[in-house]
Image (tube, rainbow, N blue to C red):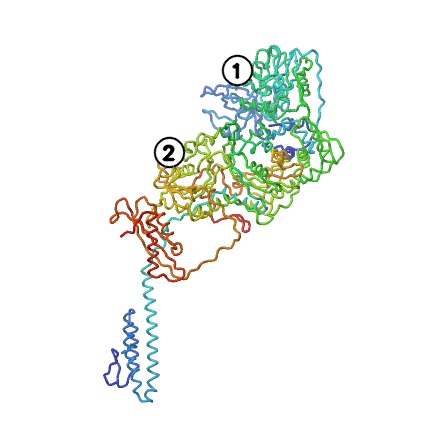
Amino acid sequence: MGSGDCRGPFRMDAKTNDLAALEADISARIAAATDEAALETVRVDALGKQGAISVLMKTLGSMAPDERQAMGPKLNGLKDRVGEAIVAKKASLVEAALEAKLAAEKIDVSLPPGPKRIGALHPVSQVMEEIGRIFGEMGFALEEGPDIETDFNNFTALNFPPKHPAREMHDTFFLKPDEKGERKVLRTHTSPVQVRTMLKQKPPIRMICMGRTYRKDSDATHTPMFHQIEGLVIDEKTTMADLKGTLMAFIKAYFEVDDVAVRFRPHHFPFTEPSAEMDVRCDRSGGQVRIGQGDDWLEILGCGMVHPNVLKNCGVDPEKYQGYAFGMGVDRLAILKYGMPDLRDFFASDARWLKHYGFSPYLTAGLAGGLT
Amino acid sequence: MKFTLSWLKDHLDTNATVAEIVDAMTMAGLEVEHVENPAEKLAAFSVAKIVEAAQHPNADRLRVCQVETKDGRKEIVCGAANARAGLVTIYAPLGTYVPGSGITLEARPVRGVVSNGMLCSGAELEVDTDGDGILELDASLKVGMSAAEALGLSDAVIDFEVTPNRPDWLGVAGIARDLAAAGLGKLIEKPAPSPKGAFKCPVNVVVERDSGCPVFAARVIRGVKNGPSPAWLQQKLKAIGLKPRSALVDITNYLSFDRARPLHVYDVAKLTGTVRARLGKAGETFVALDDETYEITPDMCVIADDKGVLGLGGVMGGKDSGVTEATTDVLLEAAWFEPLKIAQTGRATGINSDAKYRFERGVDTGFVIGGHDLATQLILDLCGGEASELMLAGEVPAPPTGFAFDPGRVKSLAGLDVSGKRAKEILIALGFTVKGDDKRFDVTPPSWRRDVEGSADLVEEIARIEGFDKLPANAPPRANGFRAPPTGVGESRLRLARRALAGAGYFECVTWSFCEKKHAELFGGGSEKLVLANPIASDLDCMRPSALPNLLRAAQRNLDRGRGDMMLFEAGPSWSGDTDADQARTVAAIWQPRPKRSWRGAEAPDVFDMKRDCLMALEAMGAPSSLQAGPADAPWQHPGRGGSLRLGNKVIATFGDVHPRILNALDVEGPAMAFEIKVDLIPAPRAKATHAKPALEKLDLMPLTRDFAFVVEEGVAAADLVRAAFGADKQLVADVILFDVYRGKGVDDGKKSLAIEVTLQPREKTLGDGEIEDVSKKIIAAVAKATGGALRS
């Protein structure tokens, strides 16, 4: 090389071509590089066009073959090692820079996020979906009717004789009389939907309906507005035994119990004959009602075989068709399952109650995974 | 109604326990409300005798009594004015719980003198309502005798409810019949008395046609002595909460409860001329036994004499013609009144007497004369005297007629296996007349069972006596296929809206369907057609035109309790009229924003949050995305900060700030925002031939964006500008975002600058500069045409 004892910025003994000293020098500078720019300078000085190693490589061509055979592998080995050391150093510098950045970006994650906005469904809505699901599985279609009803649909068609004391028991709300002196009522039960369904549809009929009902009554267990669910099955051979089996299946599914004892107790409703009230086994010890166990009875619904007069009034031939009807209070079913202490709270829109007894919007009622 | 165990045993030969009787009543259809055993309640109380009563040294009104009790002699302080030496009364030892006052006795000095027990009034024992003095008992009663025995209250009292179809159960004998049929004992049928008339009835009785009283049986019993009734009768009445009055009155009350046969007695000395059942006349009044004066109307049935109204037939007798201790000659009435007439009179007068309660449900037509005979005999037995012949005015209504019955109906209707023989046995036990073989009966109901009209009624009779507990339970049906939707589209939309809104932070409420009329008017309702004739409260007198007033009030109530920032909604009905079509399914929501402070800076909810939530609920319900924004439309909206969402000319939804005037009228603090969706106006989903979705168009060419700023008049709606840009090239314009609204320097007064970013989606090849220029020109032209706006220079 003769041009000096120096290869670029690196020191080496030209006489001996002391590669070991060169390598040590380059390694020291790689190790000393504190950032990517310093490392790049080292790379250019060693491996760049005019870099120490590159210049040495160029001398190989002018060497005698035996000398070249000895120097070639040494120089290539040196070049590879230096290249790898630079790549490794570079990776560690990138890593260190990221670590430093991350450390600088640290925040207090215990701070509160923005306000969480999640509301809730009213228990009545949830319970109606549960009930709808259970009867839907049994093939009941959902029918609807208006809250403002005619006297005929609410009473007369259902075999309430005009002026009969049974009407008085309903504490009916009336609208003001029209020009003809007829006054509409707020339906006192969901039974007028039975009438509407029979009038528009031929048997067989298998329906439920749910909705608001009204009676002029207000105390701890009565509110002027409440909710009912009604069921009706009409065909040529349905009996009270079918009614009992269907209601038992409903009670089991709704209360999510494996078995439940029920009792049919004779009762009187103008629109059914025979009529019954159904009680279920319950346990009242400990202040809460538990359905399905214990040795007490709890009245849960009214039911019976549709009265022949009702069939007649709705255009269904009582000589050919028969069937059953049942009705129960949705709010009461909600209370029995979910334990709200007071019916009046259902309609008070108190935020504390809505949050406590309301249902997550993600909790849809289903039979496969349980209703709740 | 109430009866006692011993009373029941007058009619039923049974060894059944009270529990068994209650159970059998329940399973026969009689709802037992309560069973009270006074012997248990009064176990600690006993008879005692005051030996000496001295004035209390420190209190004028108190006496210090030396009392002979079952526990020996006791010094007892007593405040009753009638506490005197020699009085036999009831004593309660220390530690006794006194039911009437709700306290447990302790040895505490009363004004310096310790009382070692208590002497009791009837009210304190809850045996009557007399709290004025301590009980005064028969002096012959032995000290130490139990109070229940001394007061004749050792009997269990069963309180039960009777359904309106069974007036025969309003008499103890009727209950005994059902219990006997149910196998609980043997019915005791007593021979019917037939008192002989010694003279012709001296009072003429007439029933007028259509008076509501088809028959009136009468007899005069003269020479009676009307004093207190005998102890057995008084005890019976007292045990069921009736106050004994005099023998004559007690007999009528007794038969009302024993045989469901109301009767009335008149003092003959107070009658003038003919006694007549007729319709009332306008302007007539009378003073009833309850001392109230009632106005008579022409649709009421009255019993009158030549001077005027004696009583409201079957409802209540008159004060002036009633019997007293001085009565010697008495006219006994056993009549039958039309149930509807009685119910009507009861409603009009507000009287709810035991007689009215029975007549309006239907009293046994077959027991008019029998009941009269029985009462006559009792009067003769208890009050002496001499009876006239029976005078029967009018005619006893015809008994129920018979019909054919196939006992197989029990199986085919109730699902219960009962043999023809057994069915016949049950009906006969209940008093029905049954003829025919076991396959087909001819059944005639008894006169007290006018509720039985056909086969279904007989199935009920047979099934309930055989026992509803024997009803089998058939397996429930399964849905037969998946075609029939369990829910209609309207209802399922409400379900979707509920879950969407609850997921966005709103709480679902269920509020009254009614509201105050003046509030209804503020929300566009309040029509006379929707006003309740008999509201439960004056502020709940009108069917609501919207749930919003109720929700706004609810939010304010919560705010008043310290819970602000209420987001509430209701998915339910509202009304614009009284026809079926006038009931609309609506989703109403309100937000009374009171955002909390936050380290990130507080939120500032505004109309656009409401608009976003409204659109979200609409989308959840499947409303089309092509809804157009329009101006405020509902009366509750702030005119400038409210809008509507329309489909053609139909307003599907309204949203915005609530009008300050409305907030003021509802007494709700602003700010408050709301939206309301008319769910039924959302078009129903169209039935499609296939459920497959159209093929996905995945364009590979890069979309590009271009910004435009237009200067428009202040009144121009941004949505119109956006829509114009969208429509400028339906092939290429894929999206338009409005990202800036600017007023101020560089824009003339009365104008504003709206900036949009338009996304162009090349379809077949990359767009060249010329093509982009062409689209830009189209957009500028379309916006200019729609809004009059020009590109901002």
The x and y percentages for residue A112 are 37, 51
Residue closest to the far left: A4
C-alpha distance separating marks 2 and 1: 46 Å
The residue under label 2 is B665
Q: At which x and y percent is residue A224?
A: 49, 33
Q: Chain of mark 1?
A: B
Disc tally is 2
Q: Is residue A372 visible?
A: no
Look at label 2 and name its amino acid. Ala
Q: Viewed as shown, does residue B111 lie left or right of A235?
A: left
Q: Toward the viewer: B539 or B63?
A: B539
- Pick the residue in front: B706 or B553: B706
Local secondary structure at mark 2: helix
Q: Quadrant of residue B429?
A: top right
Looking at the rendered structure, whether the residues under marks 2 and 1 are on a common chain is answered as yes
- Most foreground residue, B744 or B232: B744
Q: Work out which quarter of the rendered image holds the N terminus of chain A and state it.
A: bottom left
Query: In x, y percent, where is residue A260?
Result: 60, 44
The reply to whether residue A141 is visible in this rendering is: yes
Circle 2 crowding by C-alpha within 10 Å: few under 14, some 14–19, many from 20 = few
Q: Which residue is mark 1?
A: B283
Which residue type carries mark 1?
Answer: Gly
Dot 1, how many residues are within 10 Å of its Cα: few (below 14), some (14-19), or many (20+)?
few
Instruction: State the mark number for residue B91.
Output: none
- In the displayed structure, does residue A14 sit left or right of residue B611? left
The residue located at (56%, 34%) in the rendering is A153
